């Protein structure tokens, strides 16, 4: 990338090619490129596809689990958020599938729901019957850790990545 603030055509082409090749696979790097290409209309398609690939190839789940070492983030929670985004006609308001999924998981209270479901699973208790208090304690611990991870990733956006007028 050139050292000046101006994005050259060659630099832009390199960034778009990296998006199309799916060689960028972290949220931080995708956000960096998204910011650089913010005013490049021809980058919207590759950026949209890169975000979808990031989410659907389990890179988002891997990053969430990297942030939730004590209680690995629920793949079921993320899957439900993805399903809800796909089913939501308002999801066309953004090119950023990752942001939409993270927002949906947070705003639809999917984290506490899936934390409670996890805590109620018999396999979580090694064949013993847990008390209601024990299940609540586990659900709260999972919910707190998972919510922190979601919020940490959502902090990468100062403003919502939405399309004008939507």
Image (spheres, helix red, strand yellow):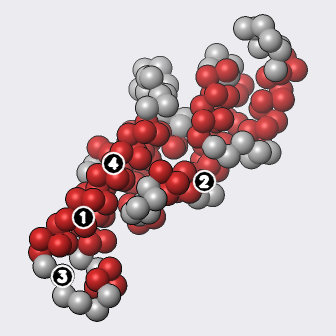
Of discs 3 and 2, which sits in the foreground?
3
Query: Which element is circle 4 on?
Result: helix
Residue placed furthest toward the front:
70
Where in the figure is residue 71, as x and y percent of width and height?
39, 63
Q: How far apart are marks 3 and 1 (CA)?
A: 12 Å
Marks 3 and 1 close (CB-CB < 8 Å): no
Of discs 1 and 2, which sits in the foreground?
1
Where in the figure is residue 110, as x and y percent of width and height?
30, 55
Q: Distance between the residues labelled 3 and 2?
A: 33 Å
Q: Label 3 neighbourhood size at 10 Å, few (<14), some (14-19), many (20+)?
A: some
Query: Which element is circle 2 on?
Result: helix
Q: Tag on residue 147? A: 4
Mark 1 = which residue?
139
Where in the figure is residue 15, as x and y percent of width and height?
78, 30
Q: Tag on residue 59? A: 2
For the residue pair 98 and 83, the one nearer the viewer reads as 98
- Ranked by sequence position, the earlier of labels 3 and 1 is 3
- Ranked by sequence position, the earlier of labels 2 and 4 is 2
Marks 3 and 2 close (CB-CB < 8 Å): no
For the residue pair 148 and 103, the one nearer the viewer reads as 148
Is residue 99 toward the left or the right of residue 51 in the image?
A: left
Q: Distance between the residues labelled 1 and 4?
A: 12 Å
Whether residue 107 is visible, yes or no, is yes
- Ranked by sequence position, the earlier of labels 1 and 4 is 1
Mark 3 = which residue?
130
């Amino acid at each position: 990338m050139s050292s000046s603030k101006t994005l050259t055509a060659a630099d832009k082409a390199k960034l778009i090619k990296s998006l199309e090749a799916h060689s960028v696979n972290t949220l931080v790097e995708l956000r960096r490129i998204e910011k650089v290409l913010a005013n490049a209309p021809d980058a919207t398609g590759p950026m949209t596809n890169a975000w979808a690939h990031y989410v659907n190839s389990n890179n988002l789940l891997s990053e969430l689990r990297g942030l939730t070492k004590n209680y690995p983030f629920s793949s079921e929670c993320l899957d439900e958020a993805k399903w809800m985004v796909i089913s939501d006609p308002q999801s066309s308001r953004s090119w950023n599938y990752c942001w939409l999924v993270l927002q949906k998981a947070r705003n639809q209270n999917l984290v506490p729901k899936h934390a409670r479901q996890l805590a109620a699973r018999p396999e979580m208790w090694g064949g013993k019957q847990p008390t209601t208090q024990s299940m609540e304690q586990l659900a709260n611990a999972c919910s707190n850790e998972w919510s922190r991870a979601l919020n940490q990733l959502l902090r990468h956006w100062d403003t919502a990545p939405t399309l004008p007028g939507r």
